[in-house]
Amino acid sequence: MNFCKLEIFIPETHLHILQETLAEHDAGHIGKYDSCISYYHVKGTWRPLEGANPYKGEKDTLSVEDELKVEVTCRVENLDTIIEAVKKIHPYEEPVINAIPLIRTGL
């Protein structure tokens, strides 16, 4: 498989820098287009545990916040570099980034 889809959960305040970072690393390049992403408003929940340094929230208290779920297609060969770059700009201590293999694209 040559492509995968990344799902990245991030606060809306960081969407622009995420878009720039993805474009710099050729994520979202589909045919003759680049910067192709989709994003959706979602609710995220988490509870910081002992030793956590949360972007938002307090230890042992369940947080419920608005977030964006960003989806972007990338080449598997670029996956590690893209994830590393996203982690550098992501405000969360433990960002949720899912890489899902794609059997076919552009159907």
Image (spheres, grey):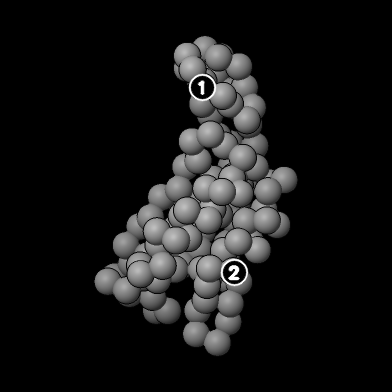
Locate the N terminus and report the quarter of the image it occupies. Answer: bottom left
Residue at image position (32%, 74%) is 2
Q: Residues within 10 Å of mark 1 (few under 14, many from 20)?
A: few
Amino acid type at mark 2: Ala
Q: How many marks?
A: 2
Residue of label 2: 23
Amino acid type at mark 1: Ala
The reply, left or right, for residue 58 in relation to residue 8 is right
The reply, left or right, for residue 105 in relation to residue 60 is left
Residue of label 1: 52
Instruction: Name the spot of residue 98 as percent of width and height, x first.
Output: 41, 50
Lower sequence index among marks 2 and 1: 2
Task: Residue 69: tell me if it is visible.
Answer: no
Q: Nearer the viewer, residue 64 or 99?
A: 99
Instruction: Name the spot of residue 71 as percent of width and height, x first.
Output: 51, 58
Q: Residues within 10 Å of mark 2 (few under 14, many from 20)?
A: some
The reply, left or right, for residue 57 in relation to residue 104 is right
* Element class at badge 1: loop
Residue 67's image quarter? top right
Residue at image position (35%, 69%) is 77
User: Is 40 situated above or below 77?
Assistant: above
